[in-house]
Image: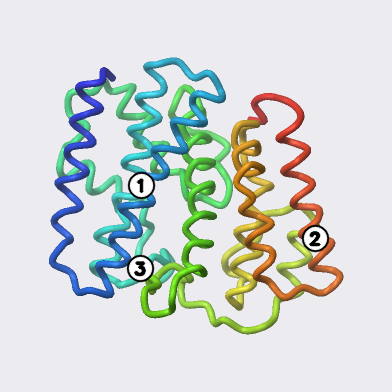
């Protein structure tokens, strides 16, 4: 992929999202949220590519993946008014559908198309499949990390906004109750990613996002997370007992350990 082809993809994206401008005001906040998320994920992707010393050709493919990874969110929200896949459709699948219907990857080699499509298809899975067609998992792992690194920002920004300006779909409809579910705390303490089906409250959803520290792939990702302080800031919004406090401390220690040691975790 050359720079001209990448620029064409960016132009397409800018044009595509404009087709959602006719939505109502509340819906528009959610559309703007995903537009901004995409821009920020592209920025994070650039930082990760540089940090992991990815070559120029690979960096352009990585940027294309970041740009296109959430295109399915726009038709998803317009049709179902949610970002919760279980209540609508898999947004990664919807994204691939958009790319193919509009044939926006035309002009790229079959190998490049495969790398981009598989990275989008697998970016939101709880865990990666044992096999994939791509010759390298690099782009899949990069977008999974870049996506998480910006979702933490999105979530914290949400809580800093006045209630009347908050995008309604961010919290997936979970109730803001002053409690955490013991099963979610146990999963976090065990160093495992919490499953969405185990989440009962908004505080559980925060724990789920914190548990993503156990699913990052690169030293650069941990370093960026360490620098930004997202996990400590998110943890500060959760009412915790002793067990939850210990689980959160282990998560923070994991960030520090990987940020300070090793290179590529994947």
The residue wearing badge 3 is: 88
In space, the residues marked 3 and 2 are separated at their CA atoms by: 32 Å
Q: Residue at x 60, y 39 (%)?
A: 224
The residue wearing badge 1 is: 38
In space, the residues marked 3 and 1 are separated at their CA atoms by: 21 Å
- Is 175 on the left-hand or right-hand side of 103? right
**Image location of residue 25, percent across then percent down:** 23, 74
- In this rendering, is residue 136 above or below 178? above
In terms of depth relative to the viewer, which is nearer, 162 or 173? 162
Q: Quadrant of residue 58?
A: top left
- In this rendering, is residue 246 above or below 46? below
The N terminus - image quarter? top left
| Residues at circles 3 and 2 in contact by the CB criterion of under 8 Å | no
The C terminus - image quarter? top right
Question: Crowdedness of circle 2 by 10 Å Cα count: few (<14), some, many (20+)?
Answer: many
Q: Which tag, 3 or 1, sits closer to the chain's start?
A: 1
**Image location of residue 19, percent across then percent down:** 13, 56
- Is 195 on the left-hand or right-hand side of 110? right
Observer-side mark, 3 or 2, equals 2
In terms of depth relative to the viewer, which is nearer, 263 or 91? 263
Q: Which tag, 3 or 2, sits closer to the chain's start?
A: 3
Question: Which disc, if any, is residue 247?
Answer: 2
Q: Residue at x 61, y 53 (%)?
A: 230
In space, the residues marked 2 and 1 are separated at their CA atoms by: 31 Å
Q: Which tag, 2 or 1, sits closer to the chain's start?
A: 1
- Secondary structure, mark 1, is helix
- Secondary structure, mark 2, is helix
Color theme of the render: rainbow
Q: Residue at x 38, y 74 (%)?
A: 168
Question: Which disc, if any, is residue 130?
Answer: none
- In this rendering, is residue 20 above or below 1? below
């Amino acid at each position: 992929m050359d720079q001209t082809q990448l620029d064409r993809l960016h132009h397409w994206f800018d044009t595509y999202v404009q087709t959602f401008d006719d939505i109502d005001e509340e819906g528009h906040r959610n559309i703007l949220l995903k537009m901004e998320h995409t821009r920020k994920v592209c920025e994070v992707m650039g930082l990760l590519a540089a940090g992991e010393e990815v070559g120029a050709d690979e960096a352009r493919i990585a940027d294309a993946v970041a740009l296109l990874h959430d295109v399915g969110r726009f038709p998803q929200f317009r049709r179902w008014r949610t970002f919760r896949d279980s209540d609508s459709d898999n947004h990664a699948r919807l994204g691939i559908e958009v790319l193919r219907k509009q044939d926006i990857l035309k002009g790229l080699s079959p190998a490049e198309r495969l790398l981009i499509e598989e990275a989008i298809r697998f970016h939101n899975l709880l865990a990666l499949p044992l096999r994939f067609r791509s010759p390298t998992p690099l782009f899949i792992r990069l977008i999974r990390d870049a996506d998480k690194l910006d979702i933490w920002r999105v979530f914290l920004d949400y809580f800093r906004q006045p209630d009347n300006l908050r995008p309604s779909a961010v919290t997936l409809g979970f109730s803001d109750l002053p409690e955490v579910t013991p099963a979610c705390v146990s999963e976090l303490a065990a160093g495992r990613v919490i499953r969405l089906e185990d989440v009962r409250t908004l505080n559980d959803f925060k724990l789920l996002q914190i548990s993503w520290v156990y699913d990052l792939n690169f030293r650069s990702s941990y370093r960026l997370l360490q620098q930004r302080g997202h996990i400590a800031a998110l943890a500060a919004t959760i009412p915790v007992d002793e067990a939850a406090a210990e689980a959160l401390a282990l998560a923070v220690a994991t960030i520090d350990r990987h940020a300070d040691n090793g290179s590529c975790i994947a």
